[in-house]
Image: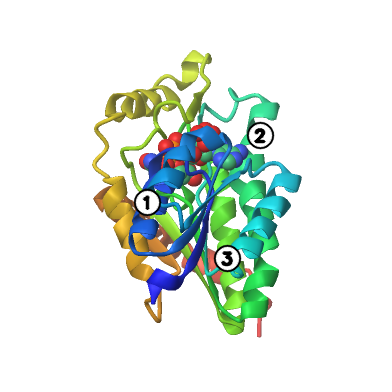
Amino acid sequence: MSSQKVWFITGCSTGFGRTLAKEALLTGAKVAITARNIMSIKDFEKDFPENALLITLDVTDPKQVKAAVEETQKMFGRIDVLVNNAGYGLMGAIEEVPNDEIKKLFDTNFFGLLAVTRQVLPIMRQQKSGYIINISSIAGVAATAGMGFYNASKFAVEGLSEALALEVNPLGIKVTLVEPGPFRTDFAGRSLHKYNGIADYDNTRGVAQKTIEEYDGKQPGDPEKAAQAIISLIDHPYPPLHLPLGKMAVDRMRDKISSFSENISAWEKVALDADFKK
Ligand SMILES: NC(=O)c1ccc[n+]([C@@H]2O[C@H](COP(=O)([O-])OP(=O)(O)OC[C@H]3O[C@@H](n4cnc5c(N)ncnc54)[C@H](OP(=O)(O)O)[C@@H]3O)[C@@H](O)[C@H]2O)c1
């Protein structure tokens, strides 16, 4: 069945987006492959002339979002799978990152994803079917010192997607949050904007920054295996709302659940005493 499906993927120049576009095309699917710089995806046209539709798309540009979705609908007649993948990282302590950088991050990681989703939803509602896959991060589940704004942007994606699932599941539309740990893409290199400068954060933000710089190119996660995992969800009757990817993501999700649980146990009495007496 997945072979006839129509996909729409954002951020396909490199990394997860590019890999997923290729793997989806190899299943025989039709794919709207989008990227800010269309030259970065030109090779798909030659390799998959029938099924690859190349579109310029910066997710922060509302006109491009509207035009890209309309072009896909016109060319393929439907959209079955939306993958909101475009995004980047931002490191720096909460005190260190300038406001305009924080706003730019949210414009892409949250508002861009939101704009594309809202443009595609009417099509999926009309079809009474569809699947929205939001590439979040394990950083959308558990925070790290020095990653606060990236954490916030992905936590926002998590909250939005959980509510979206409740709204659209009854309409035949599925939603999955993909939460990768570190994967070998351009994320920790050219896609990571870095700020520092306050020495008091050298033992927190500084350590995290050094760790990320050191693992760039050596991350345990394989983007091709991530793409295969995502493809395996497509025809599943009950795909998960949350899919952590890679051992580090699974471990961090389990740690988060345990720490929530320990927190409730330690403070349950205080929490319960806050209700009116019955
Ligand atoms: N790799 C990891 O370890 C990891 C872990 C957890 C989550 N993620 C998430 O995975 C997603 C993909 O990242 P990646 O790891 O594949 O890194 P990547 O190789 O750097 O790819 C990022 C992609 O996002 C695109 N992009 C950035 N801003 C955009 C915008 N405004 N409009 C359209 N496209 C935009 C980039 O396009 P340009 O080429 O034009 O810059 C690029 O195609 C991101 O959402 C990231 O947060 C990655």
Mark 2: amino acid = Lys
- In the rendered structure, the answer to whether residue 144 lies left or right of residue 225 reads right
Mark 1: amino acid = Lys
Mark 3: amino acid = Phe
Cα gap from disc 1 to disc 3, whole angstroms = 18 Å
Task: Give the mark nearer the N terminus: 1 vs 3.
Answer: 1
Where does the image place residue 77, in percent across and percent down from the top left?
61, 69
Q: Residues within 10 Å of mark 2 (few under 14, many from 20)?
A: few
Where does the image place residue 196, in percent across and percent down from the top left?
51, 18
- Camera-nearest residue between 214 and 235: 235
Front label number (1 vs 3)? 3
Residue ID for mark 3:
76
Cα gap from disc 2 to disc 3, whole angstroms = 32 Å
Q: Are marks 1 and 2 in contact (CB under 8 Å)?
A: no
- Camera-nearest residue between 224 and 108: 224
- Label 3 residue SS: helix
Mark 1 C-beta to ligand 1 under 8 Å: no
- Label 1 residue SS: helix
Quadrant containing the C terminus in the rendered view: bottom right
Task: Give the mark nearer the N terminus: 2 vs 3.
Answer: 3
Quadrant containing the N terminus in the rendered view: bottom left
- In the rendered structure, the answer to whether residue 98 lies left or right of residue 243 reads right
- Label 2 residue SS: helix
At 35% from the left and 29% from the top, the residue drawn is: 212
Residue ID for mark 2:
104
Mark count = 3
Residue ID for mark 1:
22
